Amino acid sequence: GAGVSQSPSNKVTEKGKDVELRCDPISGHTALYWYRQSLGQGLEFLIYFQGNSAPDKSGLPSDRFSAERTGGSVSTLTIQRTQQEDSAVYLCASSLTNLGVGADTQYFGPGTRLTVL
Amino acid sequence: RKEVEQDPGPFNVPEGATVAFNCTYSNSASQSFFWYRQDCRKEPKLLMSVYSSGNEDGRFTAQLNRASQYISLLIRDSKLSDSATYLCVLNTDKLIFGTGTRLQVFP
């Protein structure tokens, strides 16, 4: 079946503009995660949605970052008033659920490469 | 102390060698563990899941030591295509990723 998809694959924007990044998880997956990865660095957790529970926003670096997940499926990560330090690859992952043997395996999308000029 | 710690490497090994990476974690409540591999400029992909004491898949063996709070990955008969960054991951109800260990296999 289809994997996790993300769009756009690349985004170049000017400092101060807002951007929206989209993630389509695997159908039926209740858990959805956003990470970002700067060049040569590890994965930085941003936000996590699990079913209808309130999202875990503990990783969002500032109030310029927000995310929503509509209808328990597609998610949008919004960055307002982008800064150059926001440049990174933004990765989305989904899993069947957040716990349970075999059910918590995360599958990643190809990422959105964001460049803020 | 970081929740997940890995030696960043790089580990440079010849083809055919056996190489092992260790990963230590601080949260004793962690329920499951994973090794992901990430190629340059690509997304992470699952290599192995570990829900009990270990797992083996072909040339790859993962072992979990809960008492000492570490998980290892052993790669036997290394191939050039094994060159990548290997990410140690634990699940504490959300996944926590290590920063990865870089492996470079040379001819």
Image (tube, coloured by chain):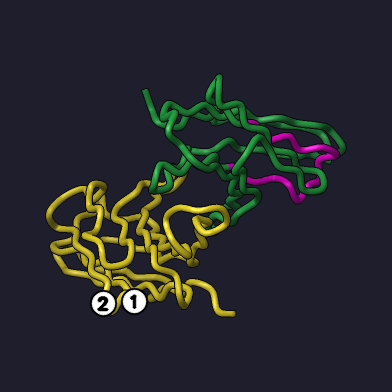
Chain colours: A yellow, B green
How many C-alpha atoms fall within 10 Å of the one at disc 1: few (<14), some, or many (≥20)?
some
Range shown magenta = B72-86
- Indicate the position of residue B14 as horizontal and vertical percent values: 82, 34
B12 over A19 or under it: above or below:
above
Horizontal relation, residue B51 to residue A117: left or right = right
B65 over A49 or under it: above or below:
above
* Residue position marked by numbered label 2 in the rendering: A70
Residue contact between numbered discs 1 and 2, judged by CB atoms under 8 Å: yes
Which image quadrant for residue B7?
top right
Which image quadrant for residue B61?
top right
The residue that appears at 29% across and 55% down in the rendered structure is A47
How many C-alpha atoms fall within 10 Å of the one at disc 2: few (<14), some, or many (≥20)?
few
- Indicate the position of residue B28 as horizontal and vertical percent values: 44, 28
Horizontal relation, residue A47 to residue B48: left or right = left
Q: Amino acid at mark 1?
A: Val
Q: What chain does mark 2 sit on? A: A
Verify whether residue B61 appears in magenta: no
* Residue position marked by numbered label 1 in the rendering: A74
Name the foreground residue: B104 vs B30: B30
From the image, which quarter does the N terminus of chain A lie in?
A: bottom right
Q: What chain does mark 1 sit on? A: A
Verify whether residue B79 appears in magenta: yes
**Residue at the top extreme?**
B68
Q: Amino acid at mark 2?
A: Thr
Q: Circle 1 sits in a helix, a strand or a loop, which is it?
A: loop
Which image quadrant for residue B19?
top right
Question: How far is the residue under mark 1 from the one under mark 2?
Answer: 6 Å
The residue that appears at 62% across and 32% down in the rendered structure is B64
Q: Circle 2 sits in a helix, a strand or a loop, which is it?
A: helix
- Indicate the position of residue B48 as horizontal and vertical percent values: 65, 48
From the image, which quarter does the C terminus of chain A lie in?
A: bottom left
